[in-house]
């Protein structure tokens, strides 16, 4: 994976329940990983979702293989925009990770 293509800074966040002084639990997103990513263009089958209809909410991110485990329960944030992770695919033998996401 070429470093020059990793142009976007992304953050992977995990949901945690934080309990305040009154014992009330609130769900909050806490960062578990900040890294650089390549934003891939959607393929033709993803680009055309219907007759003449486009879905700009889907995105594919490529990152170097992380040291922490990422799951579909986590979310991805880029430029203040949150994406729900819908799929993960390993590239090579722990060379990289492909993250398929949909804007929240």
Image (cartoon, rainbow, N blue to C red):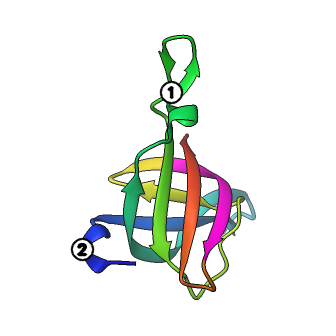
Q: Which residue is mark 2?
A: 4
Q: Position of residue 47 (x, y in %)?
A: 50, 31
Secondary structure mostly seen in magenta is: strand
Q: Nearer the viewer, residue 22 or 68?
A: 68
- Label 1: state its secondary structure: loop
**x 55%, y 82%: residue:** 66
Question: In this picture, is 29 found above or below 51?
Answer: below
Front position among marks 1 and 2: 2
Image disc number at residue 3: none
Q: Position of residue 40 (x, y in %)?
A: 41, 53
Question: In this picture, is 81 found above or below 53?
Answer: below
Image disc number at residue 55: 1
Determine crowd level at label 2: few under 14, some 14-19, many 20+ residues with C-alpha closer than 10 A.
Answer: few
Tell me which label, 1 or 2, sits earlier in the chain: 2
Residues drawn in magenta: 83-91
- Residue 20 appears in the picture as rendered: no
């Amino acid at each position: 994976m070429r470093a020059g293509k990793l142009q976007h800074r992304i953050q992977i966040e995990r949901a945690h329940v934080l309990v305040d002084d009154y014992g009330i639990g609130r769900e909050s997103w806490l960062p578990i990983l900040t890294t650089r990513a390549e934003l891939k263009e959607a393929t033709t089958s993803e680009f055309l979702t219907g007759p003449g209809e486009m879905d700009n909410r889907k995105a594919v991110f490529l990152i170097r293989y992380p040291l922490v485990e990422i799951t579909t329960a986590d979310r991805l944030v880029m430029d203040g925009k949150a994406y729900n992770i819908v799929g993960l695919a390993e590239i090579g033998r722990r060379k990289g990770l492909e993250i398929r996401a949909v804007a929240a």
